[in-house]
Image: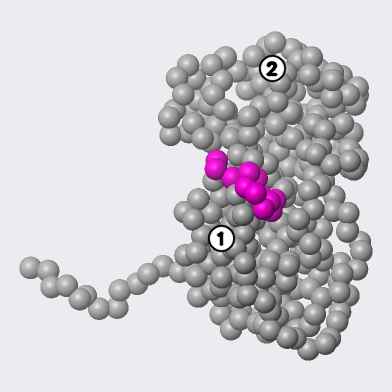
Amino acid sequence: MCFSAALALPSLPNLETTTSANCTSNWSGKDEDPNKGQAVKLSLPAYKWRLVIAYDGTRFSGWQYQQSTPTVQCILEEALTKKTKINRKELCLVGASRTDAGVHAWGQVAHFITPFNYETLDGVHKAVNGLLPSDIRVREFSPAGPEFHARFSVTSKIYCYQVYNSTIMDPFLRHYAYHSTYKLDAAVMRDAAKHFVGKHDFSAFANTSRNDRLPNPVKTIFRFDVVEKGPLLRLEVEGSGFLYRQVRNMVALLLQVGRQAVPPDIVVRILESRDRKELAKYTLLLPPHGLSLESVKYNEEHVILPTDSPASSFGRHHSINKCKVLFI
């Protein structure tokens, strides 16, 4: 099992409050949480904390907690449990996005709950990172108000898929970019990407989820940029939300456009079909290693720091007050 046993919480005052936060984090859905909008009772006192997390997803089976295989949530919960002495069910750790196996993140966001407050966060921030493996790092540790929710307060998410467009792959990017030996026309890809922008039914670009629920296929794409940095192409998409493997399917079609195998307006035709089989006629799903969750944007009112809370921690630089070595 990837999660070690945790110490039980000390007894708390028998006080309760009602909140929309979802404290169960083992649900396997891909788009919406089945408990969204349902009231969950939490013991008081309760303090909420927001984390911004970066990770190399190469060796992990995605974000979502699983007992039989290592996931980012699992490893992070182990570190938080060791530091706080609170078991995972009481921590209520919830992530903004359930990234798939092999997908990376620079700006994943999560929140968790403790029955105690912190005077400062620099120490606990350093301690948690010290307990994590080198391929996971908490970049920011902040207090959060009761209305903040890592998933339900989201206004948009930004994903980036990297493509290395050259005859020879850069070995330093082999875990973080898809290698395309076909010469890609970035200008044509930009034209095609414009068709994704707006509110659409993305059923044709969603793989079947591993649960029986049918998420709302209508999503809004705010921008879809194709940025050239030498042979490296960065396809950055910002949207209100994404269906299961939607980004990788959209990028796969844009690569076919960039190879001039299909015209740019095919995006419109496939969107209107609302049929995943229609997309499959032209392209296959891209591998996960080129994809990264870049950042998550939130309702501004929900990220206001609560009063009488410690300052956010972004890590500390070491400093030397005295020279202890005599240089000659």
Query: At 62% across and 22% down in the image, what residue appears?
Result: 186
CA distance separating discs 2 and 1: 37 Å
Query: At 87% across and 69% down in the image, what residue appears?
Result: 40
Work out whether 67 lies above or below 86. above
Amino acid, disc 2: Gln
- The span shown in magenta is 58-69
Which residue is situated farthest in the bottom direction here? 13
Q: Nearer the viewer, residue 23 or 183?
A: 23
Looking at the figure, which quarter contains the C terminus? Answer: bottom left
Helix, strand or loop under label 2:
helix
Which residue in the structure is indicated by mark 2? 256
Predominant secondary structure, magenta span = loop
Amino acid, disc 1: Val
* Magenta stretch: includes residue 139: no
Query: At 67% across and 53% down in the image, what residue appears?
Result: 67
Which residue is situated farthest in the top direction here? 261
Q: Nearer the viewer, residue 62 or 313?
A: 62
Residue 59 horizontal/vertical position (percent): 55, 43
